[in-house]
Image (cartoon, grey):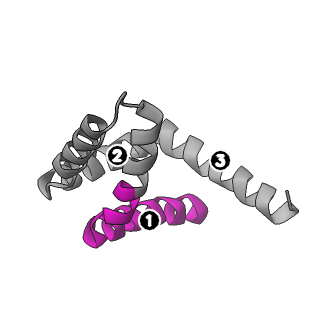
Amino acid sequence: MSKSTSDADALYTQVHRRMVESGDWDRILRVLSAKLSEQGWSDELYHRAKERARMMDPPLFKTVLEEISLHGEATVPVSVRRETTAQIRQFVKDQFEK
């Protein structure tokens, strides 16, 4: 692991800890979840996972999770992704301005 990677990991860990301690992590997750639900993304992903599991004999949780995770990451609506990213950027900006 290079120094820059370990520095980035350390920074990520520190920012994540601050977000959790301040309550911003939970707030952002609640907003993200609500937006995804409003746009039908959560229901679509749930139904896709259910159908994929039905097609397997026996259904394997790990396999379904891997396939659904890839699909889920690829299909998050751009507007939701941008809004969430903006909230995280604002939090980081506020942390470094103090």
Taking the image as shown, residue 17 lies to the left or right of residue 35, namely right
The answer to whether 9 is drawn above or below residue 58 in the figure is: below
Taking the image as shown, residue 79 lies to the left or right of residue 5, namely left
Residue 13 image point, x, y percent: 65, 46
Mark 2, residue position:
29
The magenta stretch spans residue 82: yes
The span from disc 1 to disc 3 (Cα, nearest Å) is 16 Å
The span from disc 2 to disc 3 (Cα, nearest Å) is 18 Å
Callout 3 secondary element: helix
Q: Main SS type for the magenta part?
A: helix
Looking at the rendering, the stretch of residues picked out in magenta corresponds to: 71-98
Residue 71 image point, x, y percent: 36, 57
Residue shown at the point (14%, 54%) measured from the top left: 40
Q: Quadrant of residue 26?
A: top left
Mark 1, residue position:
90
Checking the image for residue 14, the label placed there is 3
Labels 2 & 3 near each other (Cβ < 8 A): no
Residue 9 image point, x, y percent: 71, 53
Question: Can you tell which of label 1 and label 2 is closer to the viewer?
Answer: 2
The span from disc 1 to disc 2 (Cα, nearest Å) is 15 Å
Residue shown at the point (42%, 41%) measured from the top left: 65
